Image (cartoon, grey):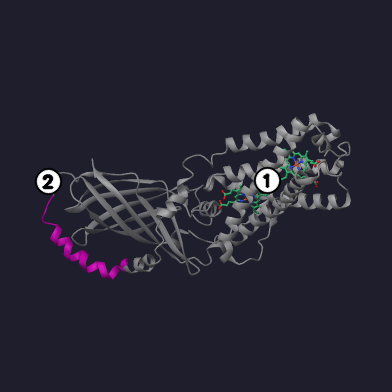
Amino acid sequence: MIGQAAERYSRGAILLHWIIAAALALVLAIGFGMPRDASGFALFQFHKSLGITILVFTLVRIGWRLTHRPPPPVERGFNGFLAGAVHFGLYAFMILAPLTGWALVSTSPIQVPTVLFGLVPLPHLPLDPALAENFENAHWLMAWIGLALFALHVAGAMKHHLLMRDGVLARMSPGGSAKAGMVLFGVVLLVGAVTFAILPGHEEGSEPVEQDIAAVAPDSASTDEAAAVEEPEATEEVVEETEEAAEPDEPAGPPPSWSIQPGGSLRFVADNAGTAMRGSFRRWDGSITMDPENPAGADIRIEIELGSATLGDATQDTMLAGGDFFGISANPTATFRSTNVTRTGANSYRANGTLSLKGASRSQAITFTLSGSGATRAVSGSATVDRTGFGVGTGENAAGLAPSVRVEFAFDATRD
Ligand code: HEM
Ligand code: HEM
């Protein structure tokens, strides 16, 4: 049934409707499109700022609606009910999406301050950090529910405008002009589509983050075990014994060089206030020259792109890249270079060398084992790094973080 389509929404309602619609298209596109690493920091801040702005505008809009009566519904019956339900759902989405986002950043294990548009600090909500994952899921779910409601709402509006031609679009258009409404509709879609298209976050390459983390099999026991393996006393004696044993086989020529094959892993884990904080580096490489039978003349160099560090959460990754942790803007890479490599067992080794990280260079030991024979070897090993020696992890956000970080790696190397 067709009602009084001639009655319109008030000017304020129309203004708020379209401002919020455009802002939502933008915040959704940024949410789905922002890269999940340090390069997304500014976008994250903008996403959060815009999200909170939408919350404020929505509260104003609800206040406005309570004091300015909307025109009577155009349709009654089931369709009228459906339109009303979608509108109600959209209001709920406009409130719950920002609130779940706010809750998620408030409970994140690594706290990143939010400064709205670089001007107004947003305090964190006093919520239980144990709920972090729930809020993350809720925020994701709200975004998808909102997108679905948005699609239903637009489909309904277009059905009325193009098929039923009952003037519903004009009710929500500036000056009562359905043409203006169509233009605004186009602007909203364009804002969302263009923003999403130019952002890199949804492209291949940003996806593997989660897979990487999933591959970092979270067997909690390994952390403690690991610390034990690294006890220097345990290995020191063996080193001396085996060093002599290894001496006699003088190599005939220069040690062979090996290529690190793609698909390896370089992970780190540290205790953070009682829970293991696990992450990995996605981009690293190195060069190895070493005769496994006689490692004395070996030269091992590893280079790690610190901006590729990920904890599987974009917010936390941004934190890692920042000055309190890796400070990638001043020192984007960390390097390890061996000074002497010794054999500690039948197929186990220890490389002493220098780790350069965040502008500091300090001696660092790495232990590793080789398996396989011939031209391809599986390499796996670990190191315990004293992060405090490099100034990694300062400030409030690292308050609960243990000083030593265990680094683990596994990769295949083939002889060149
Ligand atoms: C209307 C408001 C909002 C909408 C529609 C929205 C939408 C989205 C979407 C679509 C994503 C990507 C979902 C995913 O892939 O997990 C996202 C992620 C995110 N949002 Fe929002 N958001 C809003 C407000 C906020 C606010 C107010 C904050 C914080 C103050 C916030 C913080 C975040 C964070 C930190 C992420 C990244 C989560 C992660 O990757 O783990 N959002 N948002
Ligand atoms: C971009 C395309 C959009 C178009 C063409 C559009 C069109 C319309 C139209 C024609 C109405 C009036 C319905 C009536 O008179 O019964 C309306 C109302 C409404 N729209 Fe939209 N809209 C769009 C986007 C959005 C977005 C993104 C949201 C929010 C998430 C939204 C939320 C609402 C709400 C809550 C109402 C009901 C207002 C009230 O009764 O208080 N719209 N919209």
Question: Which quadrant contains ligand 2?
Answer: top right
Q: Residue at x 39, y 63 (%)?
A: 219
Task: Give the answer, above or below, for where 228 lies relative to 21.
Answer: below
- Give how far across and how far down residue 180 sits, in percent: 79, 31
In the image, the segment drawn in magenta is 229-250
Reply yes or no: does residue 274 show up in magenta: no
Is the C-beta of the residue carrying label 1 under 8 Å from the nearest atom of ligand 2?
yes
Q: In which quarter of the image is residue 352?
A: bottom left
Reply yes or no: does residue 246 show up in magenta: yes
Characterize the local packing of mark 1: few (<14), some (14-19) or many (20 or more) Cα atoms within 10 angstroms. some
Q: Which of 35 and 401 is in front in this view?
A: 35
Q: How far apart are marks 2 and 1 (CA)?
A: 73 Å
Is the C-beta of the residue carrying label 2 under 8 Å from the nearest atom of ligand 1?
no
Q: Is the magenta stretch mostly helix, strand or loop?
A: helix
Q: Which mark is residue 166?
A: none
Residue placed under numbered mark 1 in the picture: 149
Identified by mark 2, the residue type is Ala
Q: Which of marks 2 and 1 is nearer the N terminus?
A: 1
